[in-house]
Image (cartoon, rainbow, N blue to C red):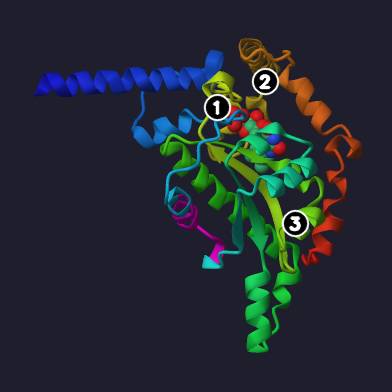
Amino acid sequence: METAEHARAAHSHQRAKKAIKARYRSAAPQGEGPWNDTIAHMLEHRSVRAYKSDALPDGALERIVAAAQSAATSSNMQTWSVVAVADPERKARLAKIAGNQKHILQCPVLLVWIADHSRIRALGESAGAPVEGLDYFESFLVAAVDTALAAQNAVVAAESLGLGAVYIGALRNNPEAVAAELALPRGAAAMFGLCLGYADPAGASDVKPRLPQTSVFHCEQYDPGRTTSEALAAYDADMQAFQSEQGMAPAPWTTTALARFRNAQSLNGRDRLKAAFRALGFAMK
Ligand SMILES: Cc1cc2nc3c(=O)[nH]c(=O)nc-3n(C[C@H](O)[C@H](O)[C@H](O)COP(=O)(O)O)c2cc1C
């Protein structure tokens, strides 16, 4: 009995070590810590950009949405909604908005995650009650945060079912067109999409390394000194190794990060988002 337990503990220790190493490569933190299947699943996450055409099992979407609705939500206001798009023609139109990303065409279902004030606006209207608080930036942020928390719960649930997923922020290239395509009411706007489906093993990707924990994890007070130039250089090297392994052109993360935020143009048209969301009913005062 004790031997079986020891074997289990040793196996779990090995699995943890391997997963931490995959996530952090040269910056893998040493030391022990608790480990279980939930953490193991989360550490094994990788975005999936190649899908088989197989449909999701019956009832899977409903379970995934139940997991999403189980996320914490600011003041229990639940200011988000999700639209599942499986119609190939509608997916194709959404893919076009999102820069023709082929995985949107391939995946059997695209979930579009919506920051949604429309339910509470409608409630205010039918109750004859003002809902002026919705007009402030804080309320937009609450909806955006709630939407992201719900979506990430959905990703964890989907991955636990053996499905793959990739977020599609590029739907924000044209929020007005997405709103028209999905018949969104006033006060509702797509924050991002999420491709779901079974990964095509031919296009399998690996676990992408992250910044060292020392850079993102602070105790008591933030210490910018924890992000050293040596740590960034090591991360650049780890990312380049990862990209080479995946058959991608190696590009240092620091170069990519600086290019991503260089100027308004580097946001690929998304520098106008405040105006777009205002037009969709988020005043953001
Ligand atoms: C909000 C959000 C939007 C994203 N948008 C896209 C996208 O439009 N297309 C894409 O291929 N990946 C997209 N991604 C996936 C990221 O590129 C990916 O999560 C990141 O490179 C880390 O890789 P990993 O998920 O495999 O660990 C997005 C991720 C997030 C969180």
- Mark 1: which amino acid? Gln
Residue 281, horizontal then vertical, whole percent: 78, 67
Q: Is residue 31 visible?
A: no
Vertical arrangement, residue 267 with respect to residue 78, above or below: above
Q: Which residue is mark 3?
A: 181
Quarter-of-image position of residue 80 = bottom right
In this rendering, would 214 be left or right of 13? right
- In three-dimensional space, the C-alpha distance between marks 2 and 1, rounded to whole angstroms, equals 12 Å
Q: Is residue 169 visible?
A: yes
Residue 44, horizontal then vertical, whole percent: 47, 28
Which of the numbered marks, if any, corresponds to residue 213? 1
Is 44 in the magenta?
no
Identify the residue shown where x is 63% and y is 72%: 119
The mark lying in front, picked from 3 and 1, is 3
Q: Which residue is mark 2?
A: 228
In this rendering, would 112 be left or right of 197? right
Identify the residue shown where x is 83% and y is 52%: 273
Q: Residue furthest bottom?
A: 128
Is tag 3's residue or tag 2's residue first in the polypeptide sequence? 3
In this rendering, would 125 be left or right of 265? left
Quarter of the image with the N terminus in it: top left
Residue segment shown in magenta: 64-75
Magenta segment, prevailing SS (helix, strand or loop): helix
Vertical arrangement, residue 150 with respect to residue 20, above or below: below
Q: Nearer the viewer, residue 235 or 144?
A: 144
Identify the residue shown where x is 48% and y is 36%: 163
Quarter-of-image position of residue 31 = top left
- Mark 2: which amino acid? Thr
Q: Secondary structure at mark 3?
A: helix
Identify the residue shown where x is 86% and y is 34%: 266
Residue 102, horizontal then vertical, whole percent: 70, 32
